[in-house]
Amino acid sequence: MAKEPQTPLEDELARQEQEAEVTEQAAEERLVEGELEGLIEEDAAQEGGVGNPEADMLAAQVEELEQSLAEAKDQALRAAAEAQNVRRRAEQEAEKARKFALEKFVKELLPVVDSLEKALESMQEGASDVHREGVSMTLNMQLGVLTKFGVESVEPQGEPFDPQVHEAMAMVPNPELEPNTVMEVMQKGYLLNGRLVRPAMVVVSQKAN
């Protein structure tokens, strides 16, 4: 059946209806694009914004943990340093005790050495060689034992007077010597590992009048 020709009125209505469909489609497309742009902007705001409570809380926790770790490291270093100082002091005290444990014994032994030296000096020419040699050997043995354990004698004959290790028993004018020079040693002094056990008793020169 052949299609009947449309009137001008029907043509106009069809055109307007087609234009309305195009306009509605364009409006829907613009609406969709606008929604997408809004969602993109909202996501960007959420990602880069400063008002994220969860991120702020995590950052605060991380900072607190870092501070706690730094404090723990500092305390550990201080404790290690203190332990090292304690160990060093203990080693020094032990070394000191080892070096000077014999001090009292040495003091008691020195008069024996003095007696042997005086006995050897006072022997007359009439004394037998065997007697003299026996006293000399005994004295040398005593001095050898003292030397083995860190004892050394102080014999400052002709040296400047030192009040740290010498004890002046008298001062005698002597124009041949500089003032405060040790003229005579009346009794030898002794050191134990560098520490004074007994000062040397000496006679000191002074300026002649």
Image: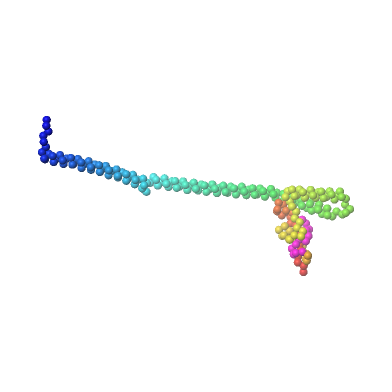
In-front residue for pair 24/204:
24
Say which quadrant the N terminus sits in.
top left
Q: Quadrant of residue 35?
A: top left
Colouring mode (rainbow / by chain / secondary structure / one colour) = rainbow
Q: Is residue 16 left or right of residue 31?
A: left
Q: Is residue 185 above or below residue 44?
A: below
Whether residue 203 is visible, yes or no, is: no
Residue 167 is situated, as x and y percent measured from the top left of the image, at 74, 59
Residue at screen point 37% across, 48% down: 50
Residue at the far bottom: name it.
209
Q: Is residue 89 left or right of residue 172?
A: left
Say which quadrant the C terminus sits in.
bottom right
Residue at the far top: name it.
1
Residue 108 is situated, as x and y percent measured from the top left of the image, at 75, 51
In-front residue for pair 19/191:
19
> What segment carries the magenta color?
177-188
Residue at screen point 89% across, 53% down: 126
Does 184 appear in magenta? yes
Residue 39 is situated, as x and y percent measured from the top left of the image, at 31, 43
Q: Is residue 99 above or below residue 175?
A: above
Whether residue 33 is visible, yes or no, is: yes
Q: Is residue 2 left or right of residue 56?
A: left
Residue at screen point 74% across, 48% down: 148
Residue at screen point 71% across, 51% down: 193
**Total label count?**
0
Does 100 appear in magenta? no
Residue 73 is situated, as x and y percent measured from the top left of the image, at 52, 47
In-front residue for pair 33/171:
33
